[in-house]
Image: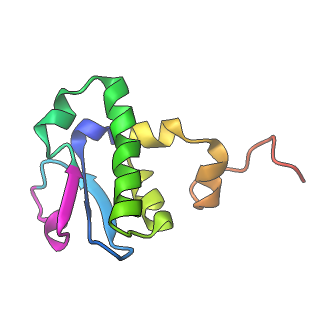
Amino acid sequence: MKLVEAMYGWNRNSDEIDVGPWPDTTGWSDRYSLTGGACYTNIRQMSPDEQAAQIFIDFHMIVLRDGVDVQAAHRAFLKIDEFRRSIAPETMRRSGRGEESRNTPR
């Protein structure tokens, strides 16, 4: 999903993080104490380049400041199109979601 349609929720010092649709009409994000993404007007008003940068700023903040497990955050953020398109293919494979690259040494 595109960032302008995605909200992320997480709990500090845990592996509890998910990305889901915004607006949240089902209450999926209620279990999280912190949220980010499209639920903030300024995110929706950013240019596409600013949004792509903001995804990585938020990712680092969630992992470094809030102590969320990096692999859990990575798996959740793979649901965001701009994040997935911006990372190297081998990082997709490491998380179990990508295909093996033709350039992978054997």
Pick the quarter of the image with the N terminus.
top left
Image position, residue 36 (x, y; %): 22, 51
Residue 31 drawn in magenta: yes
Q: Quick check: 54 above or below 68?
A: above
Front-lying residue, 99 or 87:
87
Could you tell me how many numbered marks the image carries? Answer: 0
Residue 67, picture quadrant: bottom left
Residue 60 appears left or right of 36: right
- Place residue 62 in its image quadrant: bottom left
In this rendering, the answer to whether 46 lies above or below 36 is above
Percent x, y of residue 45: 17, 27
x 41%, y 53%: residue: 60
Identify the residue at image location x=29%, y=39%.
Answer: 3
The quarter holding residue 64 reads bottom left
From which residue to which does the magenta span run? 25-36
Residue 98 seen: no
Residue 8 seen from this side: yes
Q: How is the image coloured?
A: rainbow
Q: Residue at x 14, y 46 (%)?
A: 39
Above or below for 15 versus 76: below
Question: Which residue corresponds to the image point at 18% horizontal and 73% vertical from the top-left?
Answer: 31
- Counting from the top left corner in percent of width and height, residue 70 is at 48, 64
Outermost residue, bottom side: 14
